[in-house]
Amino acid sequence: MVINIFGVGRAMTKAATLQVVNVLQCMADQKIWLNYEPYYWEDRYARYTNSRGIAAHEEAPLLMNADEEIGSNDRFLHSLIKEQNKYHIVNKYIRGMGRIGRINHIQKPELSIIVVRNIYSQLASIFMGRWDLLGQGLKHRHDKSRFLSEIEKIEVPDKNYLISVAKNRLDINALYWFVMNYVSIKNSDEKTIIIFDDEIAGLESKLISTLLPNRESVHEGGFHSMCNVPGHEIHGDKFLEGWGSGREMFYNISNAIKVLFDLNLYPLWHRQGSGVCVKGAAVSKYMKELEGGAEMYSEYGGVGKVKIVKNEVYDFMNNELVKLLESKGHK
């Protein structure tokens, strides 16, 4: 099974991924393969950037049609699902919203999830950090120029007006948030779950009803909900564990050579270490701490909260997105 998760940066896709992995591991028929933002990172630890993923991101348009072939991007997307006969594959993208058509055309997921966050909390979360949606502070080429150029070929409400009033970095990020969310929702199909804002806590139950209609399929030991576990825990091993670190692969010359010459493979040490399952005991302990008043912490510790002042342009974007969701039957 292939499940693709989409959202722009800081949209709570990490929390969604934790819940997806949690439900999938209850199926107990295959291990889970997690490709964590492959357009930028090597794995869920987010320690090393993925040069091949970054190259694919820079070569492929930010906004793509399903039939738009870009050789390097297509080969990269195929490589992410190469092990689908052995694993359940979960791909989490934050640079894939405008590319959903092409990504899903190649990977043919059984389920897609689009996570949309309210524009004000989204922007506040982004500007707590040292990077933004267009690539500020990141290792890939800044996307502002090509984003503004590519907008010309798509239809979104009052596009020219929104471009004209985008005066600063905050406005450009807001415009990116609007365009990517609008395009992805408008083109979503019946195999897509759309999660809007605080609905993230209910994703698990939707997944259970979709993937585990017979609760007897939950493996022995019970189900430990991950809906209240903060998304940044995906970067550690408190709740998730892998099958083998894979670091030993570099000590085997033949395998090291294979890494160098098999260009359709994600690096072997990464692929070997990506299988994940949920640590039920850790989840139970966390939930007890939460009930006792434990506070969720920010992965940008010490930065503090950022408040985005409400204005009519951001309100317009948010309202247009809500109207689109309603037109798609989302309540």
Image: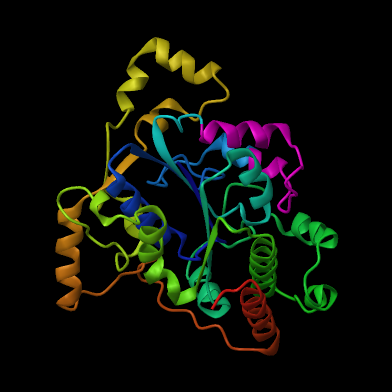
**Residue at horizontal 33%, vertical 65%?**
230
Residue 166, located in which quarter of the rendered image?
Answer: bottom right
**Residue at horizontal 63%, vertical 45%?**
103
Question: Horizontal placement of 104 versus 231: left or right?
Answer: right
Q: Does the image show residue 299?
A: no
Q: Does the image show residue 43?
A: yes
Q: Residue furthest top?
A: 254
Looking at the rendered image, the quarter that the C terminus falls into is bottom right
Position of residue 159 measured from the top left corner of the image (x, y, whole percent): 81, 73
Position of residue 270 measured from the top left corner of the image (x, y, whole percent): 41, 33
Position of residue 223 measured from the top left corner of the image (x, y, whole percent): 22, 57
Question: Horizontal placement of 306 versus 281: left or right?
Answer: right
Extent of the magenta region: 56-81
- The residue nearer to you, when weighing 296 against 182, is 182
Say above or below: 234 vs 8: above
| Colour scheme employed for the rendering of this structure | rainbow
Say above or below: 181 vs 242: below
**Residue at horizontal 70%, vertical 71%?**
175
- The residue nearer to you, when weighing 25 against 295, is 25
Position of residue 90 measured from the top left corner of the image (x, y, whole percent): 45, 45
Task: Tell whether position 282 is magenta.
Answer: no
